[in-house]
Amino acid sequence: DGFYNNWGHTYYFQKDGSRLDNGFYNNWGHTYYFGQGGVRLDDGFYNNWGHTYYFQKDGSRLDNGFYNNWGHTYYFGGDGARWDNRFYNNWGNTYYFGNDGARYTNQTYSNWGHTYWFGNDGALLRNGYVFLNSQDWYAQSDGSLRTAQYFSQFTPINAPEGCSVAALAMLLSTKGKFFNLGYAYNHVPQSGGVYNTGAFSGIIPAGALAWWAYKNIDSSVRDISGKDLSQIASIVATGHPVLYYGFSSFERMYGNRNHAKVIIGESNGYFHVLDPCYWGRGQGAHSMGGNAYDTGADSWRSWGSVASEYNGSAITIY
């Protein structure tokens, strides 16, 4: 009953003097495996019963521990089996180990009709923003990702001058914050109101819109007026959509930027813009107003196109 070391290997001979081949040995609170030829498995993997196990350099099986190799992290549970297709909760975070046992890192996971993001440290993102596939997303408290929902200023409530409210609804929808459109149309302090085009004298200033939203809907709305377009692009690239003021498809004299739109993505010098001045998200370019800014409800617009109308009035949500 003892160990024998030779040729750089370790062997175990049992009480009856026979060498332990293809068997397990338990001692000192650890499990060891001696394979074909009696050699103890050191720094190697063992596959059986539909599972993968790892035996460390000293021969002990890795239980309740992490293993790092090939640029990935793996977890071996209390019985030594590698966790495959399983979630792991610790340190207040949730992690996921995939088909090959590798921890998800900087990648999405889809299930239950939702998509989730596991970040650079492998932790499931909750209550935070992320920029994926050139678009802004928000991870809710359960980790499921959502992006902006489209709202029209014409339906279900016809508010011809209500672009600020409809755009605000799109901005906040990214975070899952929804509000009563009718109440907002009636209470947002805009000169001339939102229903009567003849009485309209100018869109509510961006700072005032941000303050109204901050007080009435979500305290994470911020006025970022004064940021240049490069700074706006940087904000969008961190996952935060941006509501900005520009020209509507109906404006003929380009003096005042009286129309609110929302940037929800950016890629290679183009911005993904949602414009509420359409009846629905599928309505395309040259279908409303007809000027150079009639680009459709949901469009990718060049940097120059957005720069030609943006004059520094913008808000975002954190």
Image: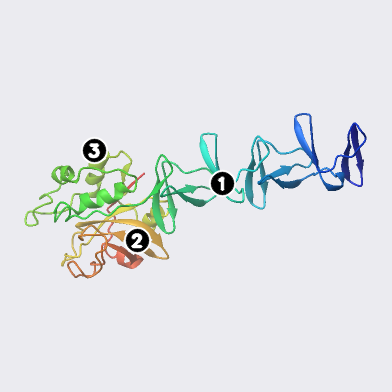
**Relative horizontal placement of residue 124, taking residue 153 as reference (left or right):** right
Check contact, mark 1 vs mark 3: CB within 8 A: no
Any part of residue 32 in sight: yes
Taking depth in this image into account, of 6 and 124 the one nearest to the observer is 6
Report which residue position mark 3 lands on.
216
- Left-right relation of 1 to 77: right
Give the residue pinned by disc 1.
Answer: 85
For disc 1, the neighbor class at 10 Å (few under 14, some 14 to 19, many from 20) is few
User: In the depicted view, which residue is nearer to us: 191 or 109?
Assistant: 109
Q: Nearer the viewer, mark 2 or mark 1?
A: 1
Residue 24, percent from left and from top: 79, 38
Quick one: label 1 or label 3, which is nearer the N terminus? Answer: 1
* Quadrant including the N terminus: top right
User: Residue 272 bears which disc, if any?
Assistant: 2
Give the amino acid at mark 1.
Answer: Asn
Query: Amino acid under label 3?
Result: Asn
C-beta proximity under 8 Å, tags 2 and 3: no
Query: Dot 2: within a 10 Å radius of its alpha carbon, few (fewer than 14), some, or many (20 or more) residues?
Result: many
Query: Could you say whether the residue bearing mark 2 is in a helix, strand or loop?
Result: strand
